[in-house]
Image (cartoon, rainbow, N blue to C red):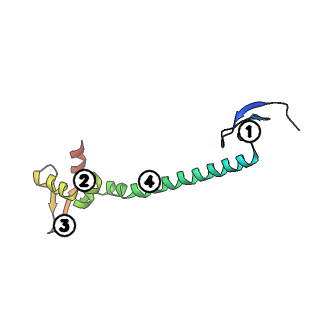
Amino acid sequence: MTSKIQVQRICQHCGKEFTARTTVTKCCSDHCSKMFYKARQRAEKIKQSNTETQQIINRPIEELKAKDFLSVKEVSDLLGCSVRTVYRLVETGQIKATNLGERLTRIKRTDIDSLLT
């Protein structure tokens, strides 16, 4: 069954103007249609990959937010600063910390939250 409709369209893939016989036609030829489909599939895979990468990047931060006591390294990762800056904040009294040994300093998560608010 053929249609007598003639709609002027612009091809979604190559950008050429063409006359479509249906209202849903997006490409000027079968070749452009296949290439447009492949490009859409490729873009979807890239988008999905980027989403997975963001989840992997954000996972450690979410785990740190769940802990009650953090090490100096974890605090520096959470705040996005250097370890030395965290020690400087402890020395000036802006963050309260507890030394449990020579290299074992722990900081309460609530103290960091109060620092940021």
Alpha-carbon span between mark 2 and mark 3: 19 Å
* Percent of width and height locating residue 117: 24, 41
Which of disc 3 and disc 4 is earlier in sequence? 4
Give residue 104's mark. Answer: 3
Alpha-carbon span between mark 4 and mark 1: 36 Å
- Amino acid type of disc 2? Cys
Which of disc 4 and disc 2 is earlier in sequence? 4
Alpha-carbon span between mark 4 and mark 3: 31 Å
Label 1 sits on a secondary structure element that is: loop
Provide the residue designation for mark 4: 54
Label 4 sits on a secondary structure element that is: helix
Provide the residue designation for mark 1: 25
Provide the residue designation for mark 2: 81
Q: Residue furthest left?
A: 92
Which of disc 3 and disc 2 is earlier in sequence? 2
For disc 4, the neighbor class at 10 Å (few under 14, some 14 to 19, many from 20) is few
- Residues 19 and 37: in front is 19
* Percent of width and height locating residue 98: 15, 60
Which of disc 1 and disc 3 is earlier in sequence? 1
Residue name at image x 27 percent, y 59 percent: 74
Alpha-carbon span between mark 3 and mark 1: 66 Å
